[in-house]
Image (cartoon, rainbow, N blue to C red):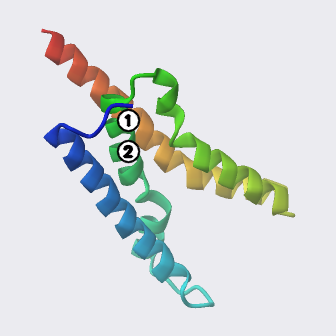
Amino acid sequence: MKPLERKADRILFALFLGTFAAYCAVFVSAFSELPLNISSLHQGLLLFSHFIPAFFLELLLCRTAALRWRLLLPALPLLAAGLWFLSGAEWYVMAWVLFLIWCIPPIAGCVTAQLVFAVYRRRKKR
């Protein structure tokens, strides 16, 4: 992996850290009080806002990864968390539904970043 030398790479890394910190704050604020009484806007942010940090991380990896297998790195924490969650859940169907709801936004962010980077490379070659 190349060091973060270019200004654009540093900006992408800062955007990833900032949006990840914001998502963590949303997550902590949602589960800080029990029972859960959060608004529908807060629920939407909790379920779908991790699309953005995953997008910036994948875009950064596309720009800096020399080996293409490193592009799968954002999926590894999802896989580990999902397997841990599914192994401990007693409601198997509900666990799969929750896991899919939780994993679809970051995977969509990664796929979107791959598409954006492919368009960028294609335009750069012209």
Report the front residue among 53 and 98: 53
- Report whether 89 appears left or right of 68: right
Which residue is denoted by mark 2 in the rendering? 57
Quarter that holds the N terminus: top left
Above or below, 70 relative to 11:
above
Q: Are marks 2 and 1 in contact (CB under 8 Å)?
A: yes
* Residue at the (30%, 21%) spot, across then down: 118
Report the front residue among 91 and 12: 12
* Residue at the (48%, 71%) spot, across then down: 43
In the image, farthest residue toward the right: 90
Above or below, 62 relative to 79:
above
For the residue marked with disc 1, what is the amino acid?
Leu
- The percent position of residue 102, horizontal first and vertical second, equals 58, 55
- Report whether 34 appears left or right of 3: right
For the residue marked with disc 2, what is the amino acid?
Leu
Quarter that holds the C terminus: top left
Which residue is denoted by mark 1 in the rendering? 61
Disc sitting over residue 113 in the figure: none
